[in-house]
Structure formats: C-alpha cells, structure tokens
Image (spheres, grey):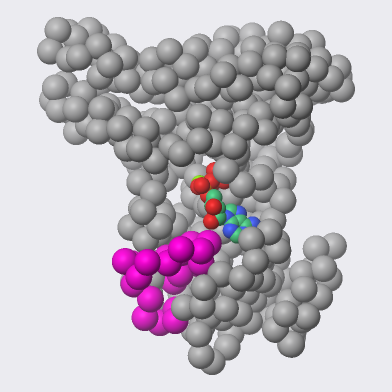
Amino acid sequence: MFHSELRALFLARFGHEPTLFGIAPGRVNLIGEHTDYNDGFVFPGAIDRGLYIAARVVEGKSHVVSKQMGDGESFDASSVVPGGGMTSWSKYPAGMAWALRSHGELPNIEAYIDSDIPIGSGVSSSAAIEMAFGVVWNMFAGLGLTNRELAKLGQVCENQFVGVNSGIMDQMASAMGKEGRAMFLDTRTLDIAYAPVPNGVSVVLCDTKKPRALTDSAYNERRSQCEEASQILGVSKLRDADVADLEGAKPKMSDVVYRRARHVITENERCIQFKEALDAGELEKAGKLMRASHVSLRDDYEVSCRELDEMADAAAAAPGCIGARMTGAGFGGACVALVHDESLEVFRAATLSAYDKATGLGGEAMACCLVDGARIVSSLP
Ligand code: ADP
Ligand code: MG
C-alpha cells in the first residue's frame, strides 16, 4: 500500500521512478534497559511501526528527503567522513554511507523516506533510518552484508558519525526482528534466542507524549558511572559482576555509583528471569519483573520522569495488565505493557484516563504486532 504513495512522492520530488523500496521497523524493549552498553542482556522486538524508503542510484551527490522532516543536506556517499558539521537528519544516511564504505564502494542515491515511528519516543526511529539506508545501499552496491553486519555498522554510524554513544540493541532489533517474536539478545556475543509473545497477550506501547528532555549529558554520565563501577569491581563490563561482588565492593564506591551498578547487575538478572518466565508461561512472574525493572530505573538509575512514572503506574493498575515499565533510554518517551487481549479496550481507556488525570497530557496507547526486521520489499523494473 505504501509503495504507491511513496512512489508518487518520489516521482513528484525527483522527476523519475524509484528503483528500490525498503522498510526498517522501530522496536520496543520488553526488559533489559541500559544494559546493552554494559555487554548485558536485552529483550526487544521489532514493531509494526516502520520507516519506508524509496531510492534510486544517481550521478552526482546523494539527495535525501523525509516526509516528516523535509530535505536533508546533500552529501557525497563516496567521500563523506565524520566531523563535517552536518546539522540535519542527513547525518544518519551520511553516517551509514561512511560506515558501509569500509566494505566497498557506494553509489550516490536519491531517497525519499516516510515513517510512522514516533520520533524521540524511545522506540528507536534513529536505528530504523540507519537500517533502511543500510539495506538499500547493501543492495545497490552488491555488498552482500547480512542484517547482523548492518546492525553493527548502524552502531558505528550512530557512535562515530552522529555522535550518540548508544549500545547495539536498537540496530539489532530493527535489523533482526522476527514476526510474532521478541528477541532475547546477548549484546556481548550478539546471540539471539527468539521467544514468542504468549498466546492471548498483546504488547502495548503507552506513549507519554512527553518529548524526551535533553538526555545526552545524563546518558554519558550514566555510562561513565558504569565504567567507574566496573573498574572498582575489577571487571571489563558490569555484565561480568554479580550482586555478591557488588556488595563486597560497596565500601569502595560512592552511593550513586553503587546504585547505578546495582541497576545494571539486577536488570541483567531480571532479563534472564523474564525469558525463563515467558518460556514457562509464568505471566505473573514476568509482570513482577517488569515492575521491578521500572522501580530500579526510577530509583537506582534515575532515568525515569514524572510522566513515565504516572504512565507505568496507570498501566499497572488498569484491567488486564500483566506488567508495565518505561522502555527506551528514559526522561520521557513511552512505557511498554503486556496486556491480556480480551481486556485491551478497557486497559487502554483506564490507563489513558488515569494518566491524563495525573498529567493533563492525554497520551496514547497502541497495541503493537512484532514483525520481521529491515529488508528490501520489492525491486521495480
Ligand atoms: P529515537 O528514540 O526515536 O531513536 P533519536 O533521538 O535517537 O530518537 O533519533 C531521532 C532522530 O532521528 C531525529 O531527530 C531525526 O534526526 C531522525 N529521524 C527519525 N525519524 C525521522 C524521519 N521520519 N525523517 C527524518 N529523520 C528522522
Ligand atoms: Mg535513537
């Protein structure tokens, strides 16, 4: 369906037909938050909110247009490098071009993108752009890269070109999603165990509509606190420590560093236990782990905010809710809830009414399907 719309937009803008279409989904993380840059465990799934791309190879520079954000800066895919001071959203495609060039020469392209992934709501619109351009260039240049390799290059783009020092979860989720399944991902080895969402259960994204506040400094601060804790514990990453190690080292750490490490270490354990609970069909246990994750993010890691707390509380108290927590980096954005299918409508109404009463922000609750990862959807003649 989107093909015809996107083709028309492309044609109107560039004056000829696109030759390739691609899609890359957003993602929701069920549990395992702020663990990926500590080499830990995460449990995301790709969702049926996606970023669509139409493209064609051209001579001259690359031109990129977004239905949501307009024209990006033009750039030369064969020579663009970090540090060029790009200010528009073009830094994502340009950064992908730079990262992909380590695997071969790239042509310049014209590209038009359209997306229904909320931007800055913790469902990773940024990884979706990276993966959408990744699959398109991979095909045009005949690089033969796997989606797993594209995910790694997406992280290189985001870390070294865009300048956001994020972990690998978002790109892996957008690239490696599987229909109907969430992925238990070991971010150290990139091993994935896919797990179906239990029958009769829906994944619901509860958007606070509170734009994420400027998070870069808080994010970098958390990262360095994790590094400090690792050093004191004598491990390379917090993944390698357990609660007993942490308690033993407590006298050597500040209270803040201790609490940051406690979040990461216990969140890794919760993520493993959540997987076991889902496998065993123990929904009540899974729900309790989601709640404990939220509380730990709120109190120990201090990345929640009033709106996320109100939404998580409203969702947890609503009919049919199995568990709810903030999802994504925090400071705004969305919560994720697992909800019994038959209660979806009452869940939505009760959650949003309690949330609106507390914040006046309305909010939005969307049931999501889990879908396949980034791919080319059809080649046109
Ligand atoms: P998120 O949690 O959604 O990934 P980020 O801050 O990491 O939030 O990425 C958001 C950025 O990604 C936007 O500021 C913009 O540069 C880019 N972006 C996301 N969606 C689009 C879109 N549809 N068109 C153009 N740029 C987009
Ligand atoms: Mg992002």
**Horizontally, is 120 left or right of 50 in the view?**
left
Give the overall secondary structure of the magenta segment.
loop
**Residue at (70% x, 14% y) in the render:** 358
Expressed as whole percent of the image width and height from the top left, the position of residue 141 reads 49, 80
Expressed as whole percent of the image width and height from the top left, the position of residue 201 reads 75, 24
Q: Quadrant of residue 24?
A: bottom right
Count the labels in the image.
Answer: 0
Residue 52 visible somewhere in the drawing: no
Residue 220 against residue 260 in the figure, above or below: below
Residue 21 against residue 30 in the figure, above or below: below
Residue 349 against residue 221 in the figure, above or below: above
Q: Nearer the viewer, residue 82 or 199?
A: 82
Q: Nearer the viewer, residue 336 or 359?
A: 359
Q: Quadrant of the C terminus?
A: bottom right
Q: Residue at the bottom extreme?
A: 59
Is residue 10 shown in magenta? Answer: no
**Residue at (64% x, 12% y) in the render:** 313
**Residue at (77% x, 73% y) in the render:** 9
Q: Nearer the viewer, residue 120 or 98?
A: 120
| The magenta segment | 76-97
Expressed as whole percent of the image width and height from the top left, the position of residue 57 reads 58, 85
